[in-house]
């Protein structure tokens, strides 16, 4: 019986999570402009919102680094290399840096 109760609780939690926690702001946000460059073969950059939000309060990013609206931020690799947008952290200090070994951590299918 206890197992069933635990299962029920887990089910309820899952239902709650999918009802509450799956809006766009908690999922992966794809940046697709990059996909159009380099002959259309470069994969979009994926921003896993959830992974970040577990480690940082919202205000760390919103609105100083990113406007809180999908597509509202024009991000380029130049800007990232200059320490803006993702580059505010992805600089080898707070998070992995942008070097050829790490391109695919952000740009993936
Ligand atoms: C920390 C994550 C991250 C890493 C690491 C990263 N990129 Fe990007 N890249 C982005 C984001 C975000 C964009 C903006 C894409 C968009 O708006 O569609 C972007 C854009 C681009 C673009 C589009 C044109 C431009 O310059 O903005 C190209 C090409 C690109 N990246 C190549 C690379 C290469 C090559 C590497 C490895 C040397 C790399 N990226 C590493 C996140 C990353
Ligand atoms: C590490 C940085 C970071 C943190 C922390 C963060 N966000 Fe975001 N958020 C982003 C980025 C990047 C985007 C995408 C912006 C874009 O597409 O130009 C975004 C987009 C959003 C959007 C727009 C989604 C959409 O579909 O339009 C909302 C809403 C949002 N965030 C809410 C939050 C809330 C609430 C928190 C805290 C619980 C939070 N964010 C924490 C970086 C962050
Ligand atoms: C406020 C700081 C901060 C900002 C801004 C930020 N990141 Fe991150 N990111 C982190 C940290 C910390 C980690 C986890 C540590 C690590 O992997 O180096 C991480 C991890 C990641 C990962 C790996 C997640 C996984 O699945 O393990 C990806 C992909 C990523 N970031 C992409 C991005 C992109 C794309 C942007 C810009 C749109 C961005 N990040 C902006 C701090 C940040």
Image (tube, helix red, strand yellow):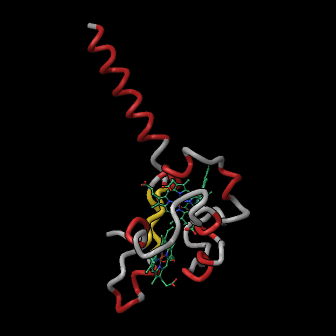
- Between residues 109 and 100, which one lies in front from this camera angle? 100
Where residue 61 appears, as percent x and y from the top left, is 66, 58
Residue 80 image-quadrant placement = bottom right
- Between residues 8 and 88, which one lies in front from this camera angle? 88
Residue extending furthest toward the right: 64
Residue that appears at 32% across and 14% down? 5
Where residue 73 appears, as percent x and y from the top left, is 61, 73
In the picture provided, is 7 more to the left or to the right than 107?
A: left
Residue extending furthest toward the bottom: 39
Residue extending furthest toward the top: 1
Residue that appears at 42% across and 76% down? 100
Residue that appears at 39% across and 34% down? 15
The C terminus lies in quadrant: bottom left
Residue that appears at 43% across and 67% down? 106
- Between residues 105 and 50, which one lies in front from this camera angle? 105
Where residue 10 appears, as percent x and y from the top left, is 36, 25
Where residue 108 appears, as percent x and y from the top left, is 35, 69
Question: Count the marks: how many?
Answer: 0
Q: Where's ligand 2: which quadrant? A: bottom right
Q: Taking 11 as reference, is 86 above or below it?
A: below
In the picture provided, is 25 more to the left or to the right than 19?
A: right
The N terminus lies in quadrant: top left
């Amino acid at each position: 019986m206890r197992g069933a109760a635990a299962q029920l609780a887990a089910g309820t939690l899952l239902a709650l999570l999918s009802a509450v926690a799956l809006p766009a702001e908690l999922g992966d946000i794809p940046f697709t402009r990059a996909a159009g460059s380099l002959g259309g073969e470069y994969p979009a950059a994926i921003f896993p919102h959830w992974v970040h939000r577990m480690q940082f309060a919202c205000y760390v990013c919103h609105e100083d680094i990113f406007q809180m609206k999908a597509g509202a931020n024009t991000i380029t690799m130049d800007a990232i290399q200059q320490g803006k947008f993702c580059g505010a952290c992805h600089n080898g200090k707070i998070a992995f840096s942008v070097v050829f070994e790490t391109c695919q951590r952000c740009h993936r299918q």
